[in-house]
Image: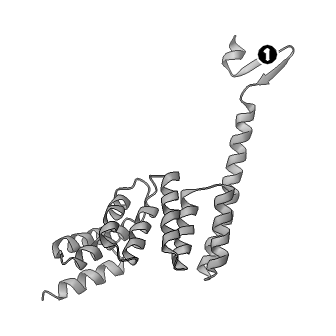
Amino acid sequence: MGAERAGVRVCGRRRVRRWASVGFIARGRRSLRHLAEVVAGEAYRRQSESDLEGAVQLYERSVRIYPTAEARTYLGWALSLQGNLTGAIRECERAIVLDPSFGNPYNDIGAYLIQLGKWDEAVPWLERAIESERYEARHYPCMNLGRFYQRRMDWARAKQAYMQALSLSPDYMPALLSLRRMLSRFN
């Protein structure tokens, strides 16, 4: 009885672990994830060297090995740099399905929609990015919201968004310059 409770079944004279295969599968998944992260790292290196085609191929390989929200988002970024904004948005949507708490794809979708001239559609995505559980660079969607409000001539909300970006990242020059440029119009 005690052995049965501990996850061990006694079969004749041999004891067999019921969940031994589960541990093996978990270790296999960890190593697949690690391999996918290594491949995605190489893709990022290629992207930083302006080899976008090589980067896209490696990100796609990484996602085939073990799909992660990060790899899908970076794949979207590489596609956007190639001018494929529709593909970039699709990859970010797939990233959100994998991990809804990851903030990067929300901001990226908002930024891509802005590039497509779909400013109003971008706002909910940017707001979700700011609210995301797992997002280090919240100043980016704040900056993008500032641009949206400034374009609408909603100066108070634009100022608030730029100030929020600066409170999150005091050295973020695009927000500082945008805020100064906007305020200088009123002096």
Residue 7 versus residue 48 in the image, above or below: above
In the shown orientation, is residue 174 left or right of residue 25?
left
Residue at 63% from the left image edge and 60% from the top image edge: 63
Depth check: 72 or 16 in front? Answer: 72
Query: How is the protein colored in the picture?
Result: one colour
Q: Is residue 37 visible?
A: no
Outermost residue, left side: 187
Looking at the picture, how far across and down is residue 184, in whole percent? 18, 88
Q: Identify the image quadrant of the N terminus.
A: top right
Which residue in the rendered view is the most extreme toward the top?
1
Q: Is residue 179 left or right of residue 132?
A: left
Which residue does the numbered mark 1 point to in the structure image?
10
Q: Residues within 10 Å of mark 1 (few under 14, many from 20)?
A: few
Q: State the image coordinates of residue 185 (x, y, percent, origin top left).
A: 17, 88
Q: Residue at x 57, y 68 (%)?
A: 75
- Residue 11: image x %, image y %? 82, 16
> What residue type is disc 1 on?
Val
Task: Give 177 or 149, whichever is nearer the viewer.
Answer: 149
Residue placed at 31% from the left, 66% from the top? 123
